[in-house]
Structure formats: structure tokens, C-alpha cells
Amino acid sequence: MIPLQGRILRPTPRKLFHKKMKPHIQIKLFASLQEFTPPSSDEYPIKAGISINSLLEQLNIPPEKAKLIFVNGVKADLTESLKGGERVGIFPPVGGG
């Protein structure tokens, strides 16, 4: 207990602060991949440890359509694992001339 100006504060049990929250990521799909953007792209729930390749499968994105992948602004590959809290950006192949 902590005295505070005549009041006594009782510590709150830790379990109230540690609700079981499912890991989530923020997904940003660019150009022709935008059609695959899920409604919950700002807080997309994932299973911790999921690979980028498995994430693409969940989103129904063919791996050959994902040319550039960034996780928290750093280039990543299909084997990269996500734990939750990351920002994932996926770009399709770029063509032109």
C-alpha cells in the first residue's frame, strides 16, 4: 500500500493489465495488390511466428505478385517471421518503360 495525501492506494492485480491480446500487424498493400487489403488492415490479427509467405496465403495473394516486402521499413523476404506489432508493406512487380 502506498500513502498519498491521506489516501491509501492499493496495488491493482497485474492480471488486469495483462489481458490476453491476440498479436496483430498493420498491413499496407500497394498498387494492384490493394484489392487484397483486408477490412482490418490497421490491426490485422495474426498468429505469432507466422511467416510472410503464410500471411500472403491468408490474404489470397499469389507469392509471385509480391515483389517487394517491407517489415517496419526494412526489406524482408517470404521466410521472415512476424511476432505482432509490425508494419508490413507489400508491393507488386513494377513494369513500364
Image: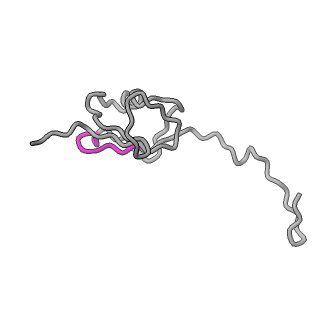
Above or below 63: residue 72: below
Color style of the picture = one colour
Q: Position of residue 15 (x, y in %)?
A: 74, 43
Residue 30 forms part of the magenta stretch: yes
Q: What stretch is highlighted in magenta?
A: 27-35
Quadrant in the picture for the N terminus: bottom right
Q: Residue furthest left?
A: 97
Q: Residue at x 24, y 44 (%)?
A: 31
Specify whether residue 40 is in view.
Answer: no
Compare residues 56 and 80 and report the one nearer the observer. Answer: 80
Number of marks in the image? 0
Residue 43 forms part of the magenta stretch: no
Hey, which quadrant is residue 53 in on the image? top left
Q: Position of residue 9 (x, y in %)?
A: 85, 61
Q: Residue furthest front?
A: 74
Above or below 27: residue 66: above
Q: Which residue is drawn at 49% across and 35% down?
A: 82
Q: Where is residue 55 in the image (x, y as percent from the top left)?
A: 41, 31
Quadrant in the picture for the C terminus: top left
Hey, which quadrant is residue 87 in on the image? top left
Q: Residue at x 79, y 52 (%)?
A: 12
Compare residues 93 and 4 and report the one nearer the observer. Answer: 93
Q: Which residue is drawn at 72% across and 47% down?
A: 16
Q: Is residue 3 left or right of residue 75?
A: right
Q: Position of residue 29 (x, y in %)?
A: 32, 43
Specify whether residue 72 is in view.
Answer: yes
Q: In this view, does 96 lie to the left or right of 74?
A: left
